[in-house]
Amino acid sequence: MKVPIDAFLTNGRGLILAYDHGIEHGPRDFDERSVDPSFIMEIASKGGFNGIVFQRGIAESYYDGSVPLIVKLNGKSELSEGEPISRQICSVEEASSLGAKAVGYTVYLGSAHESIMLQELGRIIQEAHERTLPVMAWIYPRGGKVEIDTAKEIVAYAARAGLEVGVDAVKIKYSGDVESFRWAVKCAGKVRVFMSGGPKADTEKDFLKQAREVMDAGATGIAVGRNVWQNTDPLHMAEMLRSVVIENNSLEDVLT
Ligand code: FBP
């Protein structure tokens, strides 16, 4: 049974702040400010985000309850070699006791180890749904036969896999244009689709345009990290993103 993700939406749309990079990439993504999880918690709160993504360790020490929490249940570093695999390191029960209103899990679709992750995800969905906690899956095709993870059919495959396995929301990469992302959203059926932010864009306008395009394609929202907290003025960026994603304003409205 699907679990609604309403706790993470305003006007049926969601702007979520991601901050699980410390394990995925190590501290290379951070500067003196963003290395401090308190700074991120403040951005989430003051920036009017609909949710914040933390790993367990950060949630335990820095989550202040002001914004709905998604606890990532798996994670891996970039120091390992071989086909990608990310195993569960936090239970649904622990996430719930930390105040999570949803749990997150990454699947590297296409990896030689995808079956392990899909099996783990299947069990997590069951456990989370028993507690009426929604599940958001980061579905990142990687390894195996995947050459370009942002190719139209690959992104659509990721979205569809989310529907097939039974998650409530998917976080997928941008496929580069409205039409191809619309197809991915269609493939996801009733599963809510969020675009994953990616590395910081060259300009604010570039990223806002991307956000506008995915919303035009029917996405529910975006789950973004670096394009917000690497910005020199994260709260201003958050305000502009809210204007596009939540208030459905045009790029012109936002930039003038
Ligand atoms: P960004 O908006 O900064 O790209 O964050 C989204 C995210 O999925 C994070 O949740 C995660 O830590 C990171 O990207 C993983 O990136 P990669 O594509 O290198 O696995």
Image (cartoon, rainbow, N blue to C red):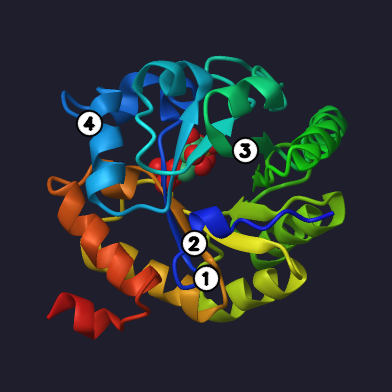
Label 4, ligand 1: CB separation under 8 Å: no
Amino acid type of disc 4? Phe
Per the image, the residue denoted by label 1 is 12
Give me the disc on residue 104: 3
Mark nearer the N terminus (4 vs 3): 4
Amino acid type of disc 1? Gly
Q: Residues within 10 Å of mark 2 (few under 14, many from 20)?
A: some
Please tell me whether mark 3 sits on a helix, a strand or a loop: strand
Per the image, the residue denoted by label 2 is 9
Q: In 3D space, how far apart are the residues under numbered discs 4 and 3 (Cα atoms)?
A: 22 Å
Q: In 3D space, how far apart are the residues under numbered discs 1 and 2 (Cα atoms)?
A: 5 Å
Mark 1 vs mark 4: in front: 1
Mark 3 vs mark 1: in front: 1
Q: Do the residues bearing badges 3 and 1 touch, measured as CB atoms within 8 Å?
A: no
Amino acid type of disc 2? Leu
Q: Which residue is depicted at the point 79% across and 35% down?
A: 121
Mark nearer the N terminus (2 vs 4): 2
Give me the disc on residue 39: 4
Q: Do the residues bearing badges 1 and 4 touch, measured as CB atoms within 8 Å?
A: no
Q: In 3D space, how far apart are the residues under numbered discs 3 and 1 (Cα atoms)?
A: 20 Å
Q: Quadrant of residue 81?
A: top right
Q: In 3D space, how far apart are the residues under numbered discs 1 and 4 (Cα atoms)?
A: 27 Å
Mark nearer the N terminus (3 vs 1): 1
Mark 2 vs mark 3: in front: 2
Mark nearer the N terminus (1 vs 4): 1
Label 1, ligand 1: CB separation under 8 Å: no
Q: Residues within 10 Å of mark 3 (few under 14, many from 20)?
A: many
Q: Position of residue 177 (x, y in %)?
A: 51, 75
Please tell me whether mark 1 sits on a helix, a strand or a loop: loop
